[in-house]
């Protein structure tokens, strides 16, 4: 047996973790110290050396993409497919469980996952029906309340009305919302987790099945588990039953906990050793002497240069609530960090793109570059520059493919086809494309539904039968009903992709979204085509996790779920948008700091280091100091994504809500020792020394002028744009073709 491949690429502490014999192991370590690597190698070790069947292993990751990568890396190490191993996010795993055990979970077979938009729509509807003023009580706050309750495992009946004095409406809406979701077969994201937890609590035979199945549970990014996820793990691994043999292995970094605002609790790291020490010993004779819980620390960073690591360490040292870890590297100091003080966000983007162009020109790969920011809205100026210069890029975490309006419309039709009770879907498409069903008709149908306790579909049917609608409305509604019924009939004979295609055609969605003669309309039509392709891919490849679940249930009598359309819809709801079609293309990565967790890039740009933006103003204004600490952890996450080079930028002016406002640089900048940085602005941008743009350089270069560039050689100016710091020229270089350059950086002669 060749185990050298598993063990050799590890240092001593990593090896100790991979081979840990403790029943429960916590690997607590800083960024880039190999936690994820250890998790991957641990699974390979279990399968290859300890002869554990992949069937008995469950690994939890933070995104679907990470899950895919983890499976790939383990399969590569072991040189064999591991189809029946469970690897996924908490949400993904919970969803699979609920699909397989829908009856036990008290759900309908074709329950539908709804996103936060749908959730908000349902809440608004309930508030309207209840006559609750949504100006006084913003529906979004109600949805936060409901999600928070669910994240903490609380149903309405667990809440004490006395604590809701003057806020009784929250309990009311929560109760009605739960009722509506239950009746119509809707499950929101928080509900997935709560339901999966309740499945353990109320269905001991299901819990027992999985406790017997899983010998090993492994969790990456453990610092960001929330209450209900932790509770779910605890119950599964036998907290409530003394006789399980389940071994847990969690890796995390308290300094990288960045989802406190979504209910994640760093405290779970501390609690882990206590909670999991209370468990029973293994009964296996060979493991008798093994400790019950072990904490292993990894201290060597393999990712970043010395300077980058020292900057990260200095920043995070300003936090007080830390478990305390050391992190060092053998790597050389590397380049200094570059800090650029931009005039405004346009100048910031121009600087970033010119720097990354330089890197690409020197042979760097676009895939190795990331532009990171605190808030998604910051991506826009970067995108503008990238498009302009023809550099391929991908934005993560923005509007997902499946969140685009035209795609959601098509999906809503499919949802209604598989489940007539899906009110949220019906509301979305009853008049999309427009078919003459006005708001008043929809209100009437809603009203009738409420009186008769029906879903909207059946309410519409009843009103038609009772002739309760005006004849024009009735004929439009009838047409809609006929359309859905007709589409349902063909379902069985068609493949998934054919079904999707049939829906798009019959509903005329392409014509509807493409009627404008614009690029946007064109893109929407292409997206609808892409949906058919996505369905085809889904049909061809299936879902590895789903297969793993099925296999686990083969011996059981548990009903299996096999409707491909419902599976595809769930995939669309849960997929993080990481698998966009262009993934194959080598491109620059743009993403928020939150989505950058766990990833690494050779060249990183960290933008918008300004008070109010990063740290975010909510944290600055909060009376709770831990909010600022979470921002700082986010900064630590950002810095530690960089392997070789890190550029940090901040602007003196930024357009916020359409107004250009002066900005102060972020306090985090002052926390990086001056010896580690160089201020780019003074060198590269002498024209920008005053905060006012020096307009006098305008017109320095004109169209038709021959110029010379240090790297690109001779060329002809073919376009000039903007002025001052924003001045850009397009030059057609003899050897390099057309390029846009920032005038004040390009140094044209
Ligand atoms: P994060 O906290 O950001 O999630 P991490 O602790 O999970 O980081 P990894 O992503 O596993 O760290 O590893 C960081 C980098 O260091 C990776 O490129 C990994 O391949 C490399 N690495 C880890 N351990 C070693 C080692 N023993 N020898 C060489 N390279 C290593
Ligand atoms: Mg990691």
Image: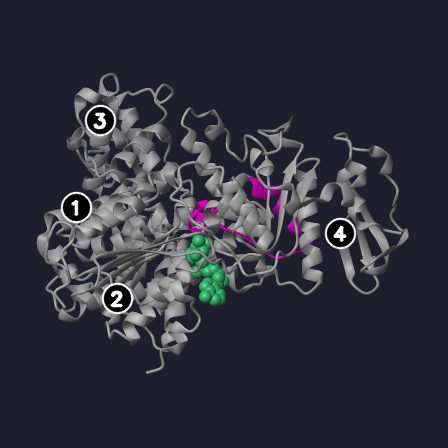
For marks 1 and 4 on the same chain, the one whose residue lies earlier in the sequence: 1
Q: Which one is in front, 444 or 60?
A: 60
Q: Which one is in front, 348 or 677?
A: 677
Q: Which residues are magenta?
A: 378-406
For marks 4 and 2 on the same chain, the one whose residue lies earlier in the sequence: 2
Determine whether label 1 and label 4 are within 8 Å by CB. Answer: no
Q: CA distance from mark 3 to mark 2?
A: 39 Å
Crowding around mark 4 (Cα neighbors within 10 Å: few <14, some 14 to 19, many 20+) is many
Quadrant of the image where one finds ligand 2:
bottom left
Q: CA distance from mark 1 to mark 4?
A: 58 Å
Quadrant of image for the N terminus = bottom left
Crowding around mark 3 (Cα neighbors within 10 Å: few <14, some 14 to 19, many 20+) is many
Q: Tell me, yes or no, whether the highlighted magenta stretch contains residue 254.
A: no
Location of residue 495 (image quadrant): bottom left
Q: Secondary structure at mark 1?
A: helix
* Tag 4 residue: 740
Residue 171's mark? 3
Q: CA distance from mark 3 to mark 4?
A: 57 Å
* Tag 2 residue: 548
Residue 198's mark? 1
Camera-near label (1 vs 3) is: 1
For marks 1 and 2 on the same chain, the one whose residue lies earlier in the sequence: 1
Q: Which one is in front, 373 or 317?
A: 317
Query: Residue 225 location, x and y as percent?
Result: 32, 46
Q: Secondary structure at mark 4?
A: strand
Q: What residue is at 35 percent from the left and 52 percent from the top?
A: 574
In the displayed structure image, the side of residue 305 where residue 509 appears, left or right: left
Query: Residue 660 location, x and y as percent?
Result: 65, 28
Determine whether label 4 and label 2 are within 8 Å by CB. Answer: no
């Amino acid at each position: 047996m060749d185990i050298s491949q598993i063990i050799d690429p590890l240092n001593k502490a990593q090896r100790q973790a991979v081979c840990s014999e403790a029943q429960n192991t916590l690997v607590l370590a800083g960024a880039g110290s190999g936690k994820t690597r250890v998790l991957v190698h641990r699974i390979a070790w279990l399968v290859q050396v300890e002869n554990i069947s992949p069937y008995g292993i469950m690994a939890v990751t933070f995104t679907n993409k990470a899950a895919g990568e983890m499976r790939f890396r383990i399969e590569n190490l072991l040189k064999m497919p591991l189809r029946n191993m469970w690897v996924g996010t908490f949400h993904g795993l919970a969803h699979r469980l609920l699909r397989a055990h829908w009856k036990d979970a008290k759900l309908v077979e074709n329950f539908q996952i709804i996103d936060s938009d749908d959730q908000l729509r349902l809440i608004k509807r309930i508030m309207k029906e209840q006559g609750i003023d949504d100006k006084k009580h913003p529906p979004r706050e109600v949805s936060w309340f409901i999600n928070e309750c669910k994240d903490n495992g609380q149903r309405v009946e667990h809440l004490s009305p006395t604590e809701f004095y003057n806020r009784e409406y929250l309990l009311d809406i929560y109760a009605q919302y739960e009722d509506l979701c239950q009746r119509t077969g809707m499950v929101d994201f928080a509900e997935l987790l709560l339901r999966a937890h309740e499945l353990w609590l109320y269905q001991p035979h299901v819990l027992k099945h999985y406790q017997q199945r899983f010998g090993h549970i492994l969790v990456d990014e453990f610092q960001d588990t929330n209450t209900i996820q932790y509770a779910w793990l605890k119950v599964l691994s036998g907290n409530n039953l003394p006789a399980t043999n389940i071994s847990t292995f969690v890796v995390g970094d308290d300094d990288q906990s960045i989802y406190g605002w979504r209910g994640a609790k760093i405290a779970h790291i501390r609690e882990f050793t206590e909670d999991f020490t209370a468990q029973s010993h293994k009964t296996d004779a060979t493991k008798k002497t093994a400790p019950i819980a072990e904490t292993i620390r990894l201290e060597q960073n393999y990712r970043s240069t010395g300077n980058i690591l020292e900057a990260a360490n200095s920043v995070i040292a300003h936090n007080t609530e830390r478990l305390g870890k050391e992190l060092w590297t053998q790597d050389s100091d590397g380049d200094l960090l570059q800090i650029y003080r931009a005039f405004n966000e346009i100048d910031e983007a121009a600087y970033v793109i010119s720097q990354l162009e330089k890197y690409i020109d020197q042979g760097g790969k676009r895939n190795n570059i990331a532009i990171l920011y605190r808030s998604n809205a910051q991506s826009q100026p970067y995108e503008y520059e990238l498009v302009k210069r023809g550099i391929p890029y991908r934005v993560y975490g923005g509007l997902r493919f499946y969140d685009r309006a035209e795609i959601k419309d098509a999906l809503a039709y499919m949802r209604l086809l598989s489940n007539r009770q899906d009110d949220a879907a019906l509301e979305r498409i009853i008049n999309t494309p427009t078919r003459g069903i006005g708001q008043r008709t929809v209100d009437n149908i809603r009203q009738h539904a409420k009186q008769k306790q029906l879903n909207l579909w059946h309410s519409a049917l009843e009103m038609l039968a009772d002739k309760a609608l005006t004849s024009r409305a009735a004929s439009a509604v009838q047409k809609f009903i006929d359309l859905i019924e007709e589409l349902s009939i063909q379902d069985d004979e068609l493949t998934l992709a054919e079904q999707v295609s049939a829906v798009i055609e019959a509903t005329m969605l392409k014509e509807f979204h493409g009627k404008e003669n614009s690029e946007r309309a064109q893109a929407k039509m292409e997206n609808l085509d892409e949906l058919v392709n996505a369905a085809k891919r889904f049909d061809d490849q299936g879902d590895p996790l789903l297969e793993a679940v099925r296999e686990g249930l083969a011996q059981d009598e548990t009903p299996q779920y096999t409707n491909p359309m419902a599976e595809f819809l769930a995939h669309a709801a849960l997929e993080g948008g990481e698998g966009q079609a262009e993934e194959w293309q080598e491109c620059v990565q743009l993403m928020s700091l939150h989505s950058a967790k766990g990833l690494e890039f050779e060249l990183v740009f960290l933008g918008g280091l300004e008070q109010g933006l990063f740290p975010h103003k909510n944290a600055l204004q909060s009376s709770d100091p831990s909010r600022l600490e979470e921002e700082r952890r986010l900064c630590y996450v950002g810095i530690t994504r960089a392997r070789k080079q890190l550029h940090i930028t901040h602007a003196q002016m930024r357009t916020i809500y359409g107004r250009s406002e002066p900005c102060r640089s972020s306090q985090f900048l002052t926390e990086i020792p001056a010896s580690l940085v160089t201020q780019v602005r003074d060198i590269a941008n002498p024209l920008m020394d005053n905060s006012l743009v020096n307009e006098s350089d305008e017109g320095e270069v004109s169209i038709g002028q021959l110029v010379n560039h240090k790297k690109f050689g001779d060329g002809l100016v073919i376009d000039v744009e903007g002025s001052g710091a924003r001045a850009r020229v397009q030059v057609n270089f003899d050897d390099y073709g057309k390029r846009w350059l920032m005038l004040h950086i390009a140094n044209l002669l």
